[in-house]
Amino acid sequence: MFSRMLFCHRYFNVFIFVIIFAILTQKIRKAETMSISNHHRLIILGSGPAGYTAAVYAARANLNPVLITGMQPGGQLTTTTDVDNWPGDIEGLQGPALMERMQKHAERFDTQVIFDHIVKADLAQAPFTLQGDSATYTCDALIIATGASARYLGLPSETAYQGRGVSACATCDGFFYRNKSVCVIGGGNTAVEEALYLSNLASSVTLIHRRDSLRAEKILQNKLFEKAHSGNIKIVWNSTLDEVLGDEKKVTGAMIRNLKTGETDQLAMDGIFIAIGHTPNTAIFQDQLAMRDGYILIKSGLDGMATSTSVPGVFACGDVADHVYRQAITSAGFGCMAALDAEKYLDSI
């Protein structure tokens, strides 16, 4: 009886060992499979016009691209209403609709779109490693199209009226304020350029700056002061935007506060343009790629491989490498170039 119990006990232990071994083996195989399946020839980071255009061209070149969307699928255009400057579209697209169409276009050519956010990148050697919230990926070539985020003041009312009278891009949205009153918040190059641009469209432009002198380049300041003297631009010094006023549908005014006296004033406005700069989404690439003011430096020039970065096999396109134009169409063109450069690189290795 005792020997039979001992035999059963041993048999039970062996049975448990076999089960544990099988589970561990399955997990190891699963991890190996995930590691293999998450390696790709080309990964594109970012789902704005640059990213999706790169995906279309890369997919048509049989590079089997994988596009990782990032935290804001569709990029900045998803916060824009009408897009009236997209060539060939005569009816006026909505920003989110345009990005949905671009995604479908990329998927039509079998681009794999993954909804994940990359939190860490290792570009020390190929294959490059990208760690996301959901998985870890490796790739032979990388296109960075993570864009740049407009800086805002952080007011709740500012957030509430974004796309309904509050904008961070005069070139994108200025047309909608023809013959209307607008104000621009800021005092650097961006603010002065926005004010000058809007002065050709709006009936009146008020530049609101928190200091008593501008930080913009002198040549821009001179142009602004000329317009302020003889045109439709007004400058309000030592003041800041305290609140965006509206009727729940659109902006109707701005509450500003004088920083020296503390006095507040309400200005009737149809639009408010926040122009305090942009922040390129490049934090995870710091100390790995050559940059200037956070923007990724690319080769440029007329000899091809114009979107190459300081690391071979890594390319950058769109607002992440462009602090001047920042348009959907220029980003799309950049994306095309990056895909062609990546194709050439992959063919060479």
Image (cartoon, rainbow, N blue to C red):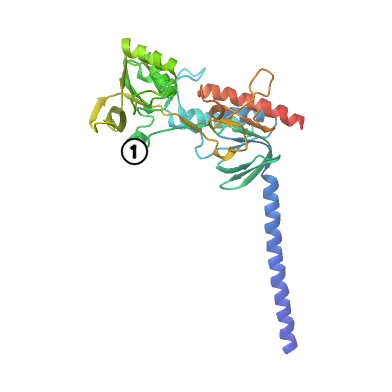
Q: Nearer the viewer, residue 319 or 96?
A: 319
Of residues 231 and 35, the one nearer the viewer is 231
Residue 249: name its quadrant: top left
Residue extending farthest to the top is 230
Front residue of this view, candidates 310 and 340: 310
The x, y position of residue 19, in whole percent, is 69, 67
* Disc 1 element: helix
Name the spot of residue 103 as percent of width and height, x first.
Answer: 55, 32
Q: Is residue 263 left or right of residue 150?
A: left
Residue 265 placement: quadrant: top left
Q: Residue at x 32, y 30 (%)?
A: 240
Q: Residues within 10 Å of mark 1 (few under 14, many from 20)?
A: few
Residue beneath label 1, please? Answer: 156
Image height of 208 relative to 43, above or below: above
Residue sitting farthest toward the bottom: 1
Horizontal side, residue 131 vs residue 211: left or right:
right
How many labels sit on residues? 1
Q: Nearer the viewer, residue 221 or 142?
A: 221
Which residue is depicted at the point 65% across and 23% down? Answer: 306
Q: Residue furthest right?
A: 349
The answer to whether residue 250 is seen in the rendering is no
Image-based side of 90 in relation to 159, left or right: right
Quadrant assignment for the N terminus: bottom right
Q: Residue at x 63, y 22 (%)?
A: 300
The quarter of the image holding the C terminus is: top right
Q: Amino acid at mark 1?
A: Pro
Query: Is 101 left or right of 159, judged from the image as shown?
Result: right
| x and y percentages locating residue 219 in the rendered image | 44, 15
